[in-house]
């Protein structure tokens, strides 16, 4: 039946697989959870009791389930590529948690596998649906800020993590855990691809050996200086968004934003005087007629996960454009791979 729920299998019932994907699929009328896999017996029992689904100790149990429409790969980062290829070859569409892969070569392998199988391949990047991201896009489209000079996106908190995502051998680190979300946003805002990448990765307050402080600087001929910073050692966080242009600026914490701008067309540019500074003072004496607005954003009633699966359902049922294409993810993976190459945090 065309209206029958799409049958989903989830590999991995950790924080993401359980709290994000299983919850969303259970609440979405377009999908049903048919099978799960996790090595922890208690997690499998919990899934059987809550969802009435089949539960397997090994990923192959999900991948081999007959009639499965979608497989969600929510396992430790270093297992994403082989499990995704296996699920595609078994005939399922695949949603992969970030990071989708560790290198551009692996991304090309995944894209080729999806093409061979004729299946949809996508990555779970719900921050594209964030209210603050939509607002920033709206402000930039208005041209209130003029020509952009600086675009800075930060995720700051102080947390001494001590879990598997702090280990390089499992593909852990801030570059894998948090940076994919905000780097994805930044790349969607830029009108051209960056041509230069500078990376500074450090292991600071967490356990393990993976980076927990990340600074990326992206440069290009026709883009603003772009900074992405994700850190677990910031006792005093800086703003999540800071964007500076030639006629204004925007700053905000993700919920409340201040925009300040002036109308360049209505302001006469000051005359350049090459002689001695009048009154021995620097500056033009110009008075700017600044406009300022403070905006506090509301929160939607439908979660980002549900809205993500709304879009996936539209693609699978009606052929709508894929919300997160693997080609768009490939862009960020290239930058992440270069950051690791520069710093040795492989």
Image: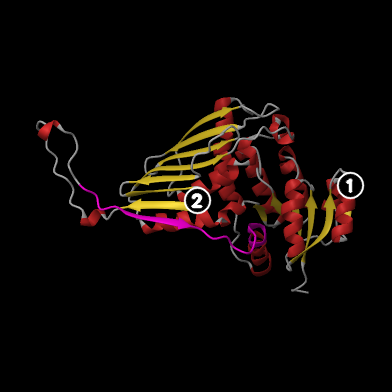
Residue under label 2: 188
Residue under label 1: 42
Say if residue 268 shows up in the picture: yes
On-image quarter of the C terminus: top right
In primary-sequence order, the first of circles 1 and 2 is 1
Count of residue discs: 2
Left or right of 49, for residue 157: left
Check the image and report above or below for 5 versus 288.
Answer: below
Residue 299 is one of the magenta-drawn residues: yes
- Start-end of magenta stretch: 287-307
- For image coordinates 87% across by 53% down, the residue present is 46
Q: CA distance from mark 1 to mark 2?
A: 40 Å
- For image coordinates 75% across by 50% down, the residue present is 17
Residue 240, percent from left and from top: 51, 44
Residue 191, percent from left and from top: 42, 50
Check the image and report above or below for 146 versus 276.
Answer: below
Residue 316, percent from left and from top: 68, 64
Alpha-carbon neighbours of circle 2 within 10 Å: few (<14), some, or many (≥20)?
Answer: some
Residue 82 is one of the magenta-drawn residues: no
Say if residue 74 shows up in the picture: no
Check the image and report above or below for 346 versus 295.
Answer: above
Left or right of 43, for residue 318: left
Left or right of 331, for residue 91: right
Which mark lies nearer to you, 1 or 2?
1
- For image coordinates 86% across by 45% down, the residue present is 58
On-image quarter of the N terminus: bottom right
Residue 239, percent from left and from top: 48, 43
Q: Secondary structure at mark 2?
A: helix
267 and 296: which is toward the camera:
296
Q: Do the residues under discs 1 and 2 have CB atoms within 8 angstroms?
A: no
Q: Secondary structure at mark 1?
A: helix
Alpha-carbon neighbours of circle 1 within 10 Å: few (<14), some, or many (≥20)?
Answer: few
């Amino acid at each position: 039946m065309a209206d029958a729920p799409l049958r989903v299998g989830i590999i991995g019932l950790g924080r993401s697989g359980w709290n994000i994907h299983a919850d969303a699929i259970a609440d979405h009328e377009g999908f049903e959870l048919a099978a799960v896999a996790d090595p922890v017996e208690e997690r499998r029992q919990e899934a059987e009791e809550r969802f009435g689904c089949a539960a397997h100790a090994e990923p192959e149990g999900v991948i081999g389930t007959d009639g499965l429409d979608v497989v969600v790969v929510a396992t430790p980062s270093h297992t994403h590529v082989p499990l995704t290829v296996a699920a595609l070859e078994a005939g399922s569409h695949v949603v992969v948690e970030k990071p989708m892969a560790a290198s551009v070569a692996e991304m090309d392998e995944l894209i080729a596998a999806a093409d061979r199988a004729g299946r949809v391949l996508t990555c779970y990047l719900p921050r594209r649906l964030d209210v603050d991201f939509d607002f920033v896009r709206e402000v930039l489209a208005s041209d209130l800020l003029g020509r952009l000079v600086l675009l800075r996106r930060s995720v700051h908190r102080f947390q001494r993590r001590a879990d598997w995502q702090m280990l390089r051998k499992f593909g852990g680190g801030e570059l894998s855990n948090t940076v994919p979300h905000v780097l994805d946003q930044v790349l969607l805002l830029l009108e051209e691809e960056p041509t230069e990448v500078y990376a500074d990765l450090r292991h600071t307050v967490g356990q393990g050996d993976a980076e927990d402080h990340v600074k990326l600087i992206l440069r290009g001929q026709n883009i603003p200086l772009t900074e992405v910073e994700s850190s677990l050692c910031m006792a005093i966080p800086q703003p999540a968004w800071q964007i500076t242009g030639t006629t204004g600026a925007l700053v905000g914490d993700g919920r409340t934003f201040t925009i300040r701008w002036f109308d360049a067309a209505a302001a006469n540019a000051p005359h350049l005087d090459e002689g001695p500074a009048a009154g021995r003072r620097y500056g033009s004496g110009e008075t700017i007629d600044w406009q300022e607005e403070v905006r506090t954003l509301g929160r939607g009633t439908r979660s980002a996960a549900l809205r993500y699966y709304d879009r996936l359902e539209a693609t699978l049922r009606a052929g709508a454009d894929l919300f997160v294409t693997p080609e768009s993810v490939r862009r960020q993976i290239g930058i992440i791979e270069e950051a690791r190459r520069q710093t040795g945090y492989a």
